[in-house]
Amino acid sequence: MTDVYTLGEALGVVSSGRVRHETEARLDVTGPEFNLAIALSRLGHRAAYLGKVGNDELGARVLTVLKGEGVDAADVRVIEGAHTGMLLRESRVGREPRLTHYRSGSAGTSLTPGNVPIDRIGSSKMLHVTGLTAGLGRNALEAVRTAVSAAKTAELVISFAVEYVPELWPSVREAEEVLGELACASHLLFLGQDELDLVKPALTPEREVVVNRGAKGASVRSDRMRYDAPALQVPIVDTAGAGDAFVAGYISAALDGLTPPERLHRGTLLSAAAVTSASDWQGLPTRADI
């Protein structure tokens, strides 16, 4: 049985300084669900990933990484004639990196409801989806909705990370409607401090709401109790991927039957590991490392 089934777009990421002056850059592959599946697999959980990649070198790299990390990639499809999406991440002194998305027409954005394996989701313990994938277009949103519906029918735990990327949405109002809908369908809700207003209807006492505040730590409200955990102080190389790692750590601890404070602790451990590496996922720990 699969522990966690997830779906999304894996894409190439080029990290550099300001492009107009930079002569060197770093190439990797990333994606919130992609990173989460790898993190869970390294911790000994059975993770399955659904997505589409182009018949190109980036697509081959995505598949090589997933399979090499022990993630079930049986549902990943290689699309002839399509390209794998790209993300340009430019570092800036004293500010958040500038992100430029090259996703239009990519293989990953062509995910449709017909690609979603209802039976495979139904035989899993948990479904994890994100608002980023829901924002990739109408077909991708319907694919996410189909997966959520399948999970509801099978009475699975549904985990949802808001992952609001303004550039992917026509308007804030549409983002609020969709993200609020998915948040209300979830049992585990992950979001940042600045995303609370986007999903207000879902912030009810019966839902486990986990707020990641980055360097300020994290908190969870569960069973009408609030628990807090400080962020761990470690040398920071790159903060990209830290949020995905935190979610994976929290979910891992939940699968292990640990308490909310223990879930927060494992989340902060994985987040700390992620920021010590230039890669979104290569620095993630195994269970033995933890």
Image: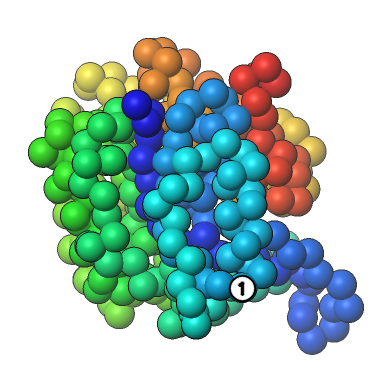
Residue beneath disc 1: 56
Q: Where residue 172 sits: x, y (%)?
A: 28, 71
User: Against 178, is 211 above or below?
Assistant: above
Q: Is residue 48 visible?
A: yes
Q: Residue 232: give x, y in percent of width and height.
A: 65, 29
Q: In which quarter of the image is residue 216?
A: top right
Corner quadrant of residue 281: top right
Q: What is the x, y in percent for residue 41?
A: 54, 32
- To which quarter of the image does residue 15 belong? bottom right
Camera-side residue: 143 or 15?
143
Q: Is residue 159 above or below residue 141?
A: above
Looking at the image, residue 207 sits to the left or right of residue 188; the answer is left
Say which of 102 and 151 sits in front: 151
Residue pictured at 75% horizontal, 33% vertical = 234
Crowding near pointer 1: few (<14 within 10 Å), some, many (20+)? some
State the residue at coordinates (46%, 72%).
79
Extreme-left residue of the structure: 153
